[in-house]
Image (tube, grey):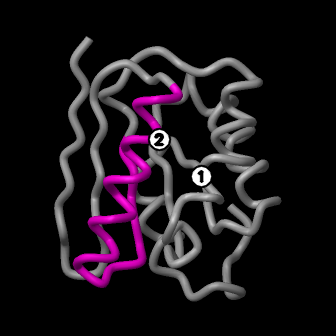
Amino acid sequence: MSCTLDLKNLERHVVATFSGTRTPEALLEVATATIGHCREHEMSLVLLDLRPSSGGLDTIETYEIAGHSLPRQDGARQLARLAILDRPENLERIRFFETVAVNRGLAVRSFGDEEHALRWLFTKPGTEQAD
């Protein structure tokens, strides 16, 4: 099955839009390409839009990606923030991913609404209000 990643630099952040089937391999490729792109363009804020994608990872796969593979990616810790945008039916799984990634020291948060995602992305760390 074909997967695509569209990377766009906006004024303050990168929008990474993934379409295709979510597999551990595909999501690691997305992470590698996005981190490399950010490093090349000296960007550190990312909005990852997963809404066009399908499928999902099981609990073990989610834990492995968020807890081990992503934090070990060269350059992952240089990202200041990663906002993940997904459809409401996927948010429970994405929030598990978020929890594991945050526990590994990454600034990740999941959202079902683009406005809230962007608000968090551009808020100075430590000054967030509870949603």
Q: List x then y, in percent, for residue 78.
A: 51, 78
Check disc 1 and give the amino acid type: Leu
* Residue occupying the point 68% across, 49% down: 98
Image location of residue 29, percent across then percent down: 38, 41
Determine whether 74 is above or below 123 in the image: above
Residues marked 2 and 1 touching at CB (< 8 Å): yes
User: In the rendered view, would you say 95 is above or below 92?
Assistant: below
Q: Does residue 54 lie above or below 16 as drawn?
A: above
What residue is shown at x 30% (from left), y 84% (from top)? Answer: 42
Q: Which mark is residue 28?
A: 2
Residue 36 percent across, percent down from the top left: 33, 65
Query: In the image shown, does 91 or 65 lie closer to the viewer?
Result: 65
Residue 124's image quarter?
A: bottom right
Q: Which residue is mark 1?
A: 70
Range covered by the magenta-colored residues: 24-49
Determine the main secondary structure of the stretch shown in magenta.
helix
- Queried whether the magenta region covers residue 25, the answer comes back as yes
Q: Is residue 50 magenta?
A: no
| Crowding at mark 2 (Cα within 10 Å: few <14, some 14-19, many 20+) | some
Image point (50%, 41%), residue name: 112
Element marked by disc 1: helix
